[in-house]
Amino acid sequence: MAAWLLALLASSGLAGKVDPKYALDLTVYHVHPANVSSVPVDMDTGDLYGDLFFFLDEFLLPLQCADPSYFFDKFECQNPEHRKGDLVATQVHLQVDSRFGNYAGCNLCTGIDPFTRKPCKKGTYICDCMNFTDPSACDHHFVGRETVQKQFVHNVSKACEVALEESCHPYRTSQFRCPRCLFQHRQRIMESCDKATAMSYCPGFAFPLCTSDSKDYDCWHMNIARKTSGAWYSTFREGMCDKGPGHCSWEVKKVKTIPERCLRDRMVNTVEEAGPECFNRCGTRNESSHCWVSCFFGTVLGPESHNSTNVTGLDREILGASWTKAFEEEAEGGCRQFTDPLDESIVV
């Protein structure tokens, strides 16, 4: 590890040790602006497939954000970890305390907290506990953990589907009438559905369910989770290991940071090579065109993934191999790594 990074870790208070009885080695990833530290203090990361979910989801944004009727989670359309030209991708080798706590949504503040809608300091990370019924349930002295499947994969029973469709189908696309309908028919609906699934039926309350009449990007979003699975982690400042006594839950062993564009090109090339006939019909690569985005997700998730939960397409191991190859040494075919803090393209 470079001397400057060791100094950074020491100055950040990361010199302590995780309790060896509970120590677990993890390799996690995160994409972030180049002027943000690669050490994930008050940040979210994902394991290989957990962060691959977030990464693939970015390819939806050109369609999602261009749709004037799309109003859920507009934050993603301005998210500086998605929508900036100076992004980097970092691989972090951690040792963590395996007694995980609740996951928090940690985002780079643009002035307003995307969850609470309260003001926050621009350019800093802010974490919101994902247990909305009890925000105090996130103990920042432990690493938070959540699975992609739990968060996004809703396997709707036939009885639940019938209850929702028969009760509220005429109002499904209405931001106001649909939730009112759910409330009016709540007794029947809750006999067959859990609350998360019921709320996912209406726009604006959760990521929509994938049905035959869903928008392409809604189905692709849910089906990315079915493809990748994976886990996410929240590493809080209060849990960083330091030289003093007391509990700590995570420490950094090693980091590698590469240009996000290099990682992105590797992934795009892998997908285009797997579906040349479709992409050739689109002409010159245009990652914002409906044709290209449709080919991308049709190749990754399968031809029925735009209006059903039938997910086929590329094996996730192929995508994972393309991802990890980018973080190998440059002499072995990996992307250029940032190791010098004076490099103008990254400021740590």
Image (cartoon, rainbow, N blue to C red):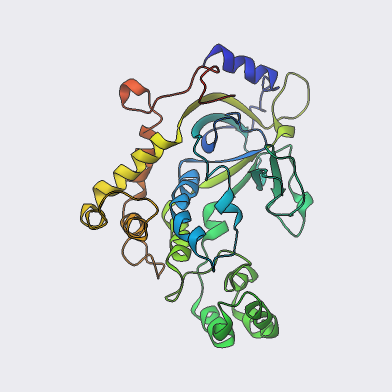
The structure residue drawn at horizontal position 24% and vertical position 46%, both measured from the top left corner, is 273
For the point 37% across and 49% down, the residue is: 316
Q: Nearer the viewer, residue 45 or 87?
A: 87
Residue 232 percent coordinates (x, y): 56, 45
The image quadrant of residue 332 is: top left
Give above or below for 336 relative to 191: above
How far from the left and from the top, in percent, is residue 80? 58, 43
- Residue 163 shows in the view: no
| Residue sitting nearer the eye, 136 or 331 | 331
Q: Quadrant of the C terminus?
A: top right
Q: Quadrant of residue 37?
A: top right
Name above or below for residue 223 compared with residue 118. Answer: below
Q: Nearer the viewer, residue 280 or 136?
A: 280
Q: Is residue 272 visible?
A: yes
In the image as oriented, which residue stretches furthest toward the bottom?
Answer: 166
Q: Nearer the viewer, residue 4 or 325?
A: 4
Q: Is residue 4 above or below residue 176?
A: above
